[in-house]
Amino acid sequence: MFDILRNRPRHERLLQRDSESHDDDTLLPGSSSSTSLTLKSQANERSSRDVQVAVRTLIACTIVYVGAAMWIAFTVNGSNLITDPDDFCIHHVSRYSPVVRDVQPNWHTQLFNGSFLHQNAFRQPAGPEVDAAWDALGVNYRSVVIAEDEAKRTGLRHDQVKVSQEYGGGFPANVEGLHHLHCLNLLRKTLHWNFDYYKSQKKGPFINSEYIVRLHTTHCLDILRQVLQCNPDVGVLGQVWWQADTEPNPTPFVDFNTKHRCRDFAAV
């Protein structure tokens, strides 16, 4: 019992100290809230700085990426952006010539006439009508003159034929596409069912001996072979069902009526 009585004052002193400490806290009612506001303010400032850093980093990265993309575009396209895909395409796949410079390609979709049984003006037997159809395509073309300052870029050599300065100078030249049509027309004329007709007329290539006509024809044949190998058409030909009157069942037949992307031939 005496021990309990001796310990009681100490316990009361502790309670009194706790009470005093509590009283001290109540004497500073704003100290806790002020500290909390300060911490929140510091946190907000840090968050704001982090956002600003992130935004600036994003902007810097965007500028770098856009700049790199523009540099690549300029480099790939000879320091020119591709603003006209048609113009870029024709310059990419064709050698330079005044035709490339002056004539718009006017790319368009063209449906080929692939009829097997129905003939058109270009497939008729030898005669004035079919000749007129081919002549209208420009098979009897004339030379053009390439200015001397464009000759090298066009692929002409300094040792090739030149026009006298008295007549304006430059280099006489032929448009290759028209030569290809000339060759195709000659193949048509030398078909065995047409040959006698044109041989009897003794015009154009047929003023020469049969030996020279043969050389001319095989030259044209090989030129067209090279053209087709240089520009192979990678389109595909489907098939349709076709039934002859004498056959009991239909059979598959190639459908040659296909669409193609073509240049404006008339403009050329």
Image: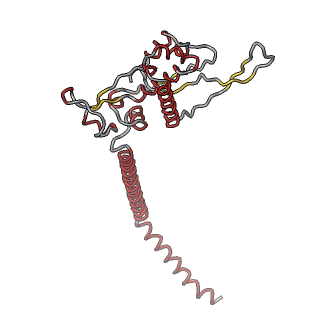
The quarter of the image holding the N terminus is: bottom right
* Residue at 33% across, 30% down: 173
Image x and y of residue 116, in percent: 63, 18
Q: Is residue 55 above or below residue 14?
A: above
Residue closer to the observer: 151 or 64: 151
* x then y, percent, for residue 37: 41, 59
Quarter-wise, where is residue 24 in the image? bottom left
Query: Quadrant location of residue 99?
Result: top left
Along the line of sight, the residue nearer the viewer: 123 or 250: 123
Which image quadrant: the C terminus? Answer: top left
Check the image and name the residue furthest to the left: 166
Q: Is 227 situated above or below 267?
A: below
107 relative position to 164: left or right: right
Image point 61% across, 18% down: which residue?
115
Could you say where residue 245 lies in the image, as x and y percent from the top left?
76, 12
The x and y percentages for residue 264 are 43, 23
